[in-house]
């Protein structure tokens, strides 16, 4: 439902009333978030852009819609920094001055705990959460979550290692991962228990919301035990052990397992096996096994073929390079003859 919102004071719950789509877009935070497509029959598919957000997208600039953007809802102070870190956009000069003025007026004191949690959850599911955390720390806004959450407590090494492993996962490869649980574990791990309790209180995080990161280590123990097994003496067996594992558990063990064997096996998984499996097209399996893709037998045939490739029993097929096309000799009255003239 399209709506308008009126705030009695900074950070207060808004009074919501029904409105037109144009009014709805004009009450939002930044112009790049105030673009829509018409659903009316006469104008369906046409862009609605009352605040000229498309131009700001083209110029890669973040601009507040009104002079009261940060006063109405102070959590937008953090959101602006998150968008800037994620999108690599510049902040319009006037908007930045509004940002500074709102902070000087002390509007951060009006941010509600649940608004802080909502922003923390968004940060935890960003593609590069550490960049956002670092940007918030530079603006001295990260301590709103917890006074101790600053500087060396940001756990840069853990976030950067996760980013490196994440980049090793081939495009299109499915590795189901609860990024909220993993990134919050990375965030909380360096904090003392007192600091963790302060963050929970400051964000009013419920037991159900805290459970995914609090129990992640315990849930990963079973996988760690399996990865230590002497029975995993072939690449295909290690692949089978990890294939159905949750991504957040695999990443966590790479971060904290003290078992050298587990670390070596995970290094091979990220550095070799993922790439090998991802590069095997269905056509290669069909050519080798004769089983057509999409048939009931194909899944098992592919699993068998993948195991053989991982164990080196089948080599990667060599695809012959196409022969270069012959060079066409020019024709016409000005073409040079290929045969030398007789003298």
Image (spheres, rainbow, N blue to C red):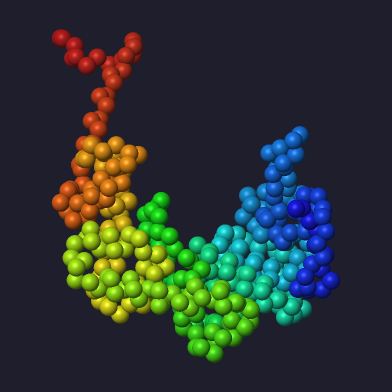
Q: Nearer the viewer, residue 30 or 63?
A: 30
Q: Residue at x 27, y 78 (%)?
A: 259
Residue 19 position within the rendered picture, expressed as x and y whole percent measured from the top left: 82, 53
91 up-or-down from 277: above or below: below
Residue 151 position within the rendered picture, expressed as x and y whole percent measured from the top left: 51, 82
234 up-or-down from 53: above or below: below
Q: For residue 60, which quarter of the picture? A: bottom right
Q: Residue at x 40, y 74 (%)?
A: 219
Q: Is residue 98 visible?
A: no
Position of 339 with respect to 56 (left or right) is: left
Q: For residue 147, which quarter of the picture? A: bottom right
Question: In which quadrant of the rendered image does the C terminus lie?
Answer: top left
Residue 222 position within the rendered picture, expressed as x and y whole percent measured from the top left: 34, 73
332 up-or-down from 150: above or below: above
Q: Nearer the viewer, residue 53 or 163?
A: 163
Position of 24 with respect to 233 (left or right) is: right
223 up-or-down from 286: above or below: below
Position of 7 with respect to 156 (left or right) is: right
Q: Residue at x 34, y 11 (%)?
A: 332
Q: Residue furthest bottom?
A: 194
Q: Residue at x 83, y 59 (%)?
A: 17
Residue 106 position within the rendered picture, expressed as x and y whole percent measured from the top left: 74, 80
Q: Nearer the viewer, residue 170 or 217?
A: 217
Q: Is residue 13 visible?
A: yes
Position of 212 with respect to 25 (left or right) is: left
Q: How many marks?
A: 0
């Amino acid at each position: 439902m399209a709506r308008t919102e009126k705030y009695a004071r900074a950070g207060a719950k808004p009074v919501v009333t029904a409105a037109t789509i144009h009014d709805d877009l004009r009450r939002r935070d930044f112009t790049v978030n105030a673009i829509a497509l018409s659903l009316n029959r006469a104008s369906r598919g046409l862009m609605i852009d009352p605040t000229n957000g498309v131009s700001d997208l083209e110029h890669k600039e973040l601009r507040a819609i009104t002079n009261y953007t940060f006063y109405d809802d102070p959590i937008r102070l953090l959101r602006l920094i998150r968008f800037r870190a994620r999108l690599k956009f510049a902040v319009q000069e006037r908007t930045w001055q509004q940002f500074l003025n709102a902070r000087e007026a002390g509007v951060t004191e009006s941010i509600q705990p649940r608004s802080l949690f909502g922003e923390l959850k968004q940060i935890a599911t960003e593609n590069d959460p550490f960049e956002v955390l670092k940007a918030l720390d530079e603006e001295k806004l990260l301590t709103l979550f917890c006074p101790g959450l600053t500087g060396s407590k940001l756990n840069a090494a853990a976030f950067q290692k996760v980013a490196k492993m994440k980049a090793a996962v081939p495009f299109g490869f499915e590795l189901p991962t609860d990024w909220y649980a993993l990134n919050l574990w990375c965030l909380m791990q360096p904090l003392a228990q007192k600091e963790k309790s302060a963050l929970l209180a400051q964000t009013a995080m419920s037991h159900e919301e805290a459970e995914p990161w609090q129990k992640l280590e315990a849930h990963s123990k079973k996988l760690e035990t399996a990865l230590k097994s002497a029975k995993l003496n072939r690449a295909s067996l290690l692949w089978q052990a990890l294939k159905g594992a949750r991504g957040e558990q695999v990443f966590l063990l790479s971060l904290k397992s003290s078992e050298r064997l587990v670390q070596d096996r995970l290094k091979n998984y990220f550095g070799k096996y993922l790439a090998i499996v991802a590069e095997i097209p269905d056509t290669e399996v069909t050519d080798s096994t004769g089983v057509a893709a999409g048939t009931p037998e194909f899944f098992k045939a592919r699993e068998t073929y993948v195991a053989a490739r991982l164990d080196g029993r089948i080599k990667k097929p060599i695809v012959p390079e196409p022969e270069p096309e012959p060079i066409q000799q020019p024709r016409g009255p000005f073409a040079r003859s290929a045969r030398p003239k007789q003298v």
